[in-house]
Image (cartoon, rainbow, N blue to C red):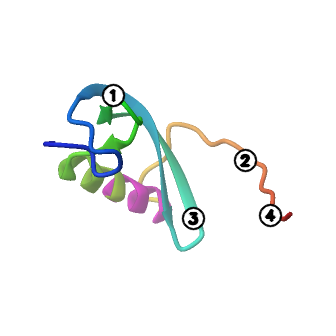
Amino acid sequence: MSKCNFCGNKDTAEKHTDYIYRHKGHFMLFENVPCEECTFCGEHYYEAKILKKIEKDFFEVLDKKKQPARKIEMPVEVFAY
């Protein structure tokens, strides 16, 4: 990455983070995903091969071809002023 698309900073660090994949009302949380993180604003950048694997794994679980590591329950709230 030459510079952050969000803040323009040129420095990044290799990190691992959580990533939520969403498709048509279905969600899956991926933990420990490798990324580059902007050292100034924290924006995350992912390699294409990482995102392709996330998408592949998501659809395998959705189609019941693979079991997720575990399931969690998540509360939902509609934002309103």
Which amino acid does the dot numbered 1 rest on? Answer: Thr
In the drawing, what numbered circle is on residue 39?
A: 1
Position of residue 81 relative to residue 31, above or below, is below
Dot placed on the residue nearer the N-terminal end, 1 or 2: 1
Q: Which residue carries the number 3 mark?
A: 26
Q: Residue at x 19, y 49 (%)?
A: 49
In this rendered view, identify the residue nearer to me: 56 or 4.
4
Q: Position of residue 79 (x, y in %)?
A: 79, 62
Callout 4: helix, strand or loop? loop
In the drawing, what numbered circle is on residue 74?
A: 2
Which amino acid does the dot numbered 2 rest on? Answer: Met
Dot placed on the residue nearer the N-terminal end, 3 or 2: 3
CB-based contact (under 8 Å), mark 1 and mark 4 = no
Position of residue 2 relative to residue 55, above or below, is above
In the drawing, what numbered circle is on residue 7?
A: none
Q: Which residue carries the number 4 mark?
A: 78
Q: Position of residue 28 (x, y in %)?
A: 52, 52
